Amino acid sequence: MEQRSLIPVGPPLTNPLPSYWHHPKSPLANVIEPEADTPTQPYTHAIIGSGISGTMVAFNLLKTQPNARIVMLEAREICSGATGRNGGHTKAASYRSYLQHVQELGKEEALVIARLEYANILETHGLARELGMEGECESEMCNTVDLIYDRGTFEVGMRAIETLKKDAEHGEKQIGKMAWYEVYEEVGEVERKFSIAGKNRNPTLAGEEEIAGAFEYVAGRIHAYRFTTGVLKECVKQGLQLCTNTPVHDIRQSTQADEHGTPMWDIFTQYNTIKATNVIIATNGYTPYLLKELQGAIVPMRGQITTQRPGSTTNLTSPLPTTYSFIYKHGYEYMIPRPRAGGSQHIIIGGGLGRLPNAGASEYGTIDDSSLNLNISAYLRESLIGYFGANNWGEKSAEEASHRVLQEWTGIMGATADGRPFVGEVPGKKGMWISAGFNGHGMVLCLKSAEALVKMMEAGATKGKSEWFPKSFLITEKRLQRCKFHGRTDMSVAK
């Protein structure tokens, strides 16, 4: 795994697989503002990356600096990276990392992280409502269930939930709050309540997997592409300049200063050079291409997702009332239902990394979202009929089964050695800021991380730190030096 982390990271490929979420495309998809194309004046802020991180940085900057000159540079189409290629989940699963965080960081910091994740979910769906696009981006808070297929993992999960509840405040344990969990130990109840088979009989696996139990808690689902491009639309109205299909290849300290005497940065794109006082790196898994010092600290990680259609005689409620994760000893899948016209539903399920040899090492260190891992494809194709059972899934014939998978695609996430993002001012580079490395959990971290980053930018990197933001997320020289990647920290619950 460490060898994979040292593969030099390149820029985004020009020919990614089509994402299910990109139909239809946003009107902003290929916008290039004339001024951004041929800039004559420097910018106050240049944001590199147009996913949810870059977008929320722009949104927060424009709230407090409405007259600032801000440009957003994107190598491909708007929101064509991880945000526009994800699984549609706003799900924290805070208990899965809680014991590890307590052991490594202490109880107080562990609680700060769990509270941030919960707040991020609430505020993401709240912003969709505030901007009047709740329906358009299919924003819905709902419960989720983790179905556990390994006894040891289930027992550790119960202990983690018990510890989190003990440490949380009384109000946080109420239904729908951060530390509310429902534990199901009776297998028959799990089968009935969540419409699953007691045994996972996926034919691509060597044997059957029995359900050990389940955990239910609050989460949500959202069309992240529409949400992000909807927020971007508001930013453009307020003066944000977009420059798509413009890869950035280098960033260097400029020989010039801005009007206040502050040194600027020269941003070298494929077509021109842009000057800015502040540069915000919101490029997640691609970050080491621009910041070589983060090679091995943030590692590209390819995820794979399918959209599938239940059979014509399905017994599944449409839409399913909860989102799902299917968790086994060395990994997990994540799944949401997406209601369709006429009462049908599409099922979006991604994962499969834990089913590969060497903990899925082949999917680390690659930025190739133009192709699929065929072993994961074969596994995911059978995953839902394995988890729900053939009767519940409801396909009448082999012909019907051949049309089960409607679309399949990949996307590049950013994994870090300690499982936490890097947020703040890049050490030794005044005016260069970062919010990246979200380990596949960006939809429960990016919005609040962007808010915290903008506070740091406006008050100074040391003065602008918020009490509600985890100190362990901050980028420091010490943290960079000790970050050597050996694999994801979220593939199993810490013991």
Image (cartoon, rainbow, N blue to C red):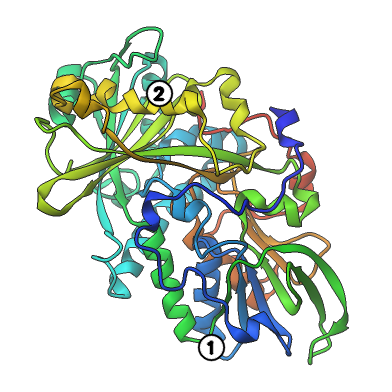
- How crowded pointer 1 is (Cα within 10 Å; few <14, some 14-19, many 20+) is rated as some
Residue 181 visible from this viewpoint: no
SS category of the residue bearing label 1: loop
Quarter of image, res 402: top left
- How crowded pointer 2 is (Cα within 10 Å; few <14, some 14-19, many 20+) is rated as many
Position of residue 470 in the picture relative to residue 262 (left or right): left
Residue closer to the observer: 134 or 111: 134
Task: Measuring from the top left, give residue 242's x and y in whole percent.
Answer: 56, 76
Residue closer to the observer: 278 or 317: 317
The residue shown at (36%, 7%) is 207
The residue shown at (35%, 62%) is 24
Position of residue 383 in the picture relative to residue 2 (left or right): left
Q: Is residue 321 above or below residue 265?
A: above
Position of residue 325 in the picture relative to residue 488 (left or right): left
**What residue is pinned by disc 2?**
379
Task: Measuring from the top left, give residue 416's x and y in whole percent.
Answer: 64, 41
Task: Measuring from the top left, give residue 374's x and y in whole percent.
Answer: 49, 27
**What residue is pinned by disc 1?**
66
Quarter of image, res 328: top left
The residue shown at (66%, 74%) is 46
Residue closer to the observer: 431 or 45: 45
Q: Amino acid at mark 2?
A: Tyr
